[in-house]
Image (cartoon, rainbow, N blue to C red):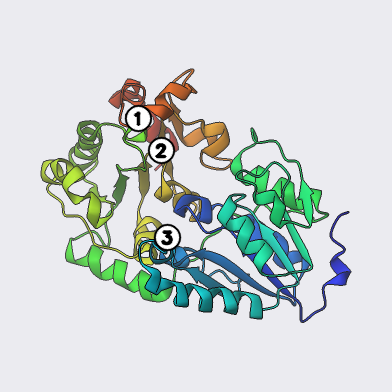
Amino acid sequence: MAVQHNQLASSGRVLIVRPTALGDVCRTVPALVTLRRAFPDARIDWLVHEGFTEAIEHHPALDGVIGFPRKRFSRLLTHPQHWRAFGRWLGQLKRNRYDLVVDLQGLARSGFFSWWTGAQTRIGFANAREGAWLGYTQRYEVDRKLHTVDRMLGLLEAAGFEVVRDMSLYVSERDRQWAGSYLKERGLLDRPFVCLAPTAQWLCKCWPLDRFEQIGGRLQKEKNWGVVVLGAPSEQAQIQPLLDGLGVDLPSTTVGQLMALVEACSLLVCNDSGPLHMGVGLNKPIVSLFGPTDPAVVGPYQRSESVVAVADAQDVSYRVRKDDQTLIGQISVESVWDKIQAVLPSS
């Protein structure tokens, strides 16, 4: 039975459950916009990893963020002192008294959180993994082969919602000012620059660093562009050869500051990673590189023109060999350079 929209009072409370990962959080915003259209006067919160709150907290369709301290609570068995804090966090989640919960992750943890709220209506995937479906009152089968965004919207459509495909992300003025200061110090405030995002969760999804260096170097020399390399502080050692080769530093950023740099750039060149979906949500020219993962499922939403992928790349063995760059290494520098020329606005 589909959700009856008129059953949710104007003072009703809605919770989106999509804690991770950063790229997935960024591309879940169409679900938020869809729910806001259906419930213009309700309170809509989002349960998300506390490290990713800045990616969504400034969205005008969102009322509140429930930050989940995943790192701290993942150590409950080895650090029993965290149980009290976890109990308080769960207690507050239940006291929020949500009327409707939508689990767009579909894993054991998100299914548990959905169930724990005690909401009268809890929507999720009937084919959710790890038994998450047990936490839902309404379950819908949605094809796993759909693009991730279309799969989430397919769940809402099956539940009776009119979907809205709006990927827009919003950067705070504070983070925008930080980015302006950073760029001004490096002479990039009034100059085109590329953001290179050379890292990803798995090394097999990472285009070789020396090729990122070649692309950045050509943009520096042939177009007189600046270069900003994006990465976490923990990735500094991994990408230091790239930084040295291009003569740039690695900005230490929050998620919000990272978004502000992407918003300001003239082009984003990236692997299958979080910055890619930021670039989509901020409507930037993008060149995205895909090896073992399928851009039809996890690529830039409705931006297939920005993809450079290896033919016949959907080989599960490469997902198992997470440190093997053989497949993505088949992407040539020239193919990426040609794609850059194609996606940049003609002058």
Residue contact at pointers 1 and 2, CB within 8 angstroms: yes
Q: Residue at x 71, y 73 (%)?
A: 98
- Residue 258 at what x, y percent from top left? 35, 60
The reply to whether the C-beta atoms of the residues labelled 3 and 2 are less than 8 Å apart is no
Q: Earlier in the sequence, mark 1 or mark 3?
A: 3
* 268 horizontally vs 193: left or right: right
Q: Nearer the viewer, residue 167 or 152?
A: 152
Where does the image place residue 291, in percent across and percent down from the top left? 41, 28
Q: Amino acid at mark 1?
A: Val
Residue 310 appears in the rendering = yes
Residue 344 visible in this rendered orientation of the protein = no
Q: Which residue shows up at 28% across the image and 55% down it?
A: 232
The count of marks equals 3
Q: Amino acid at mark 3?
A: Ser
Left or right: residue 230 compared with residue 47: left
Task: Where is residue 26? Give x, y as percent.
Answer: 51, 55
Q: Is disc 1 in contact with disc 3, using a CB cutoff of under 8 Å?
A: no
The mark that comes first in sequence, 3 or 2, is 3
Label number found at residue 74: 3
- The residue singled out by tag 2 in the image is 287
Q: Which residue is mark 1?
A: 336
User: Which of the 4 image quadrants contains residue 72?
Assistant: bottom left
Q: Nearer the viewer, mark 1 or mark 3?
A: 3
Asked whether 111 or 212 is in front, the reply is 111
Q: Nearer the viewer, mark 3 or mark 2?
A: 3
Q: Residue at x 36, y 62 (%)?
A: 78
Asked if residue 166 is positioned above or below residue 314 in the image, the reply reads: below
Question: Please, what secondary structure does the residue beneath circle 3 have?
Answer: loop
Q: Name which quarter of the figure residue 199 lies in.
A: top left
Residue at image point 37% right, 43% down:
201
